[in-house]
């Protein structure tokens, strides 16, 4: 038929990373992947926040020793950076749909619900609509 040629690599990737998978409670493999993604994300987000604060605001410090400006801006910067890293690493690990939901929840704490409901890439939003219960 028309348009049934070979799939492009990006299309195959999105199909793979948005496919239905067992929950992490049902599968030890899924649990291992999810825990690894959370571990890499936590380390990476902290590694990104510190130089960002230094280069953008000229702030250096720690959460324990301060200064307070470092603590406050660090706290505010970690969540969006963490959510972006979580979505990126989760997608690379083939679990885009799961981690897109997690990132949306994180952003939902900071954004109005009218905006956070619209967050997501087209493949994940389509699958979300197809699998959501009325």
Image: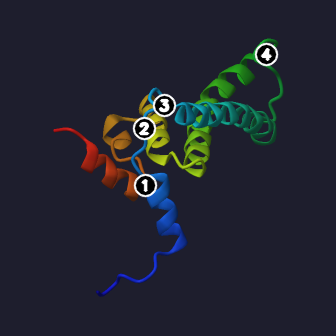
| Residue at 38% across, 58% down | 122
Q: Residue 121 carries which label?
A: 1
**Nearer to us in this view, 116 or 130:** 130
> If you read the primary sequence from the N terminus, does the residue marked by circle 4 or circle 1 appear first?
4
Between disc 1 and disc 2, the foreground one is: 2
Q: Which mark is residue 66?
A: 4
> If you read the primary sequence from the N terminus, does the residue marked by circle 1 or circle 2 appear first?
2
Q: Is mark 3 on a helix, strand or loop?
A: loop
| Residue at 75% across, 35% down | 53
| Residue at 71% across, 20% down | 71
Q: Is mark 1 on a helix, strand or loop?
A: loop
**Spatial distance from mark 1 to mark 2, Cα to Cα?**
21 Å
Badge 3: residue crowd in 10 Å (few <14, some 14–19, many ≥20): some
**Nearer to us in this view, 118 or 130:** 130
Between disc 1 and disc 3, the foreground one is: 3
The quadrant the C terminus occupies is top left
Q: What element carries label 2?
A: loop
The picture places residue 57, in percent across and down from the top left corner, at 76, 36
Q: Identify whether 87 is placed above or below 26.
A: below
Residues tagged 1 and 2 counted as in contact (Cβ below 8 A): no
**Spatial distance from mark 2 to mark 3, Cα to Cα?**
7 Å
Between disc 4 and disc 1, the foreground one is: 1
Q: Residue 24 carries which label?
A: 3
**Spatial distance from mark 2 to mark 4, Cα to Cα?**
43 Å
Badge 2: residue crowd in 10 Å (few <14, some 14–19, many ≥20): few
77 sits left or right of 14 in the view = right
Q: Which mark is residue 22?
A: 2
Q: Identify whether 92 is placed above or below 39.
A: below
Residue lying at the far left of the rendered structure: 134
Between disc 2 and disc 4, the foreground one is: 2
**Spatial distance from mark 4 to mark 1, Cα to Cα?**
38 Å
> If you read the primary sequence from the N terminus, does the residue marked by circle 2 or circle 4 appear first?
2
């Amino acid at each position: 038929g028309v348009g049934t040629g070979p799939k492009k690599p990006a299309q195959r990737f999105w199909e793979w990373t948005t496919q239905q998978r067992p929950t992490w409670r049902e599968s030890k493999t899924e649990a291992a992947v999810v825990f690894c993604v959370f571990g890499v994300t936590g380390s990476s987000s902290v590694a990104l926040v510190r130089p960002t604060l230094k280069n953008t605001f000229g702030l250096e410090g720690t959460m324990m020793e301060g200064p307070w400006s470092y603590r406050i801006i660090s706290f505010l910067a970690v969540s969006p950076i963490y959510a972006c890293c979580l979505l990126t690493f989760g997608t690379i690990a083939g679990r885009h749909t799961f981690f897109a939901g997690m990132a949306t929840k994180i952003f939902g704490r900071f954004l109005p619900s009218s905006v956070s409901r619209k967050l997501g890439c087209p493949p994940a939003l389509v699958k979300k609509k197809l699998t959501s219960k009325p």
